Amino acid sequence: MKRPKSWNDITISQYNELLKLSEIENEEERKMEYLCVLLDTTPDEVKKLPAITINEIVEELKFANKNPKSHFRRVIEIGGTKLGFITDLELLTLGEWVDLDMYCLDWENSRGKMASLLWRPITEETPVGYTIEDYDSQKAKQWSITLEREMSIQDLWGGSVFFSLIGTELLNNSKGSLILQ
């Protein structure tokens, strides 16, 4: 039974499960499911734990009462594969832009897909940077399953905040360039 210490230890799929728990009306059942998701275990296993251990775990999990931090990592490693964040958002292809726009509209159901678009396998690394695979929506869909299971919500959160700040800046710059002088 793993005991997460921060949002870095919580995967995208666990985060998605946590959000669904608010629908459980019975408070005790909701708390049990909450522990099961965060500890990646079953109710039977949680019930076997001594009360003092449960209290320690609940104390350790207080970080989950706050949103993840907006810390951003350009390069992450998942299952032995290094993934790099899109290096130049101004050069997004039409396919990338359309898919990203769709994922933003359905953020609750598209977190893994968004992650697979924003972070892709690194094909070449140099002392000054890296190159990532070209976007392929079919590969991205396959990667999204792995990323949901293995990528931390902290990384996705930080990348999403970074992306939204850059996106806002790009929109403002585009708007300014459209104004006739």
Image (cartoon, rainbow, N blue to C red):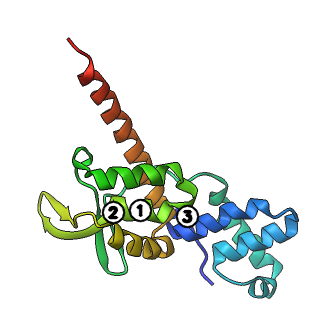
Q: Residues within 10 Å of mark 3 (few under 14, many from 20)?
A: some
Q: Position of residue 41 (x, y in %)?
A: 67, 83
The residue that appears at 59% across and 64% down in the rendered structure is 15
**Position of residue 151 measured from the top left corner of the image (x, y, whole percent):** 45, 69
> Which label lies toward us, 3 or 2?
2
Q: CA distance from mark 3 to mark 1?
A: 19 Å
Q: Is residue 99 above or below residue 180?
A: below
40 with respect to 142 (left or right) = right
- The amino acid type, in three-letter code, at marker 3 is Ser
Q: Nearer the viewer, residue 13 or 181?
A: 181
The reply to whether residue 116 is in sight is: yes
- Single out the mark in the foreground, 3 or 1: 1
| Residue position marked by numbered label 3 in the rendering | 6
Residue 52, placed above or below residue 102: below
Residue 43 in the image, given as x and y percentages of width and height: 77, 82
Indicate which disc residue 119 carries.
Answer: 2
The local secondary structure at tag 2 comes to strand
Mark 1 lies on residue: 115
Name the residue at 76% across, 75% down.
54
Instruction: Indicate the amino acid at tag 1.
Output: Ala
Vertical comparison of 50 with 29: above or below: below
Q: Quadrant of residue 123?
A: bottom left
CA gap between label 2 and label 1 equals 6 Å
- Asked if labels 1 and 2 touch by Cβ distance under 8 angstroms, the answer is yes
Secondary element at image label 3:
loop
Q: Residue at x 33, y 28 (%)?
A: 172
Looking at marks 3 and 1 on the same chain, the residue that comes earlier in the sequence is marked by 3
Q: Is residue 84 left or right of residue 125?
A: right
Which is more N-terminal, label 2 or label 3? 3
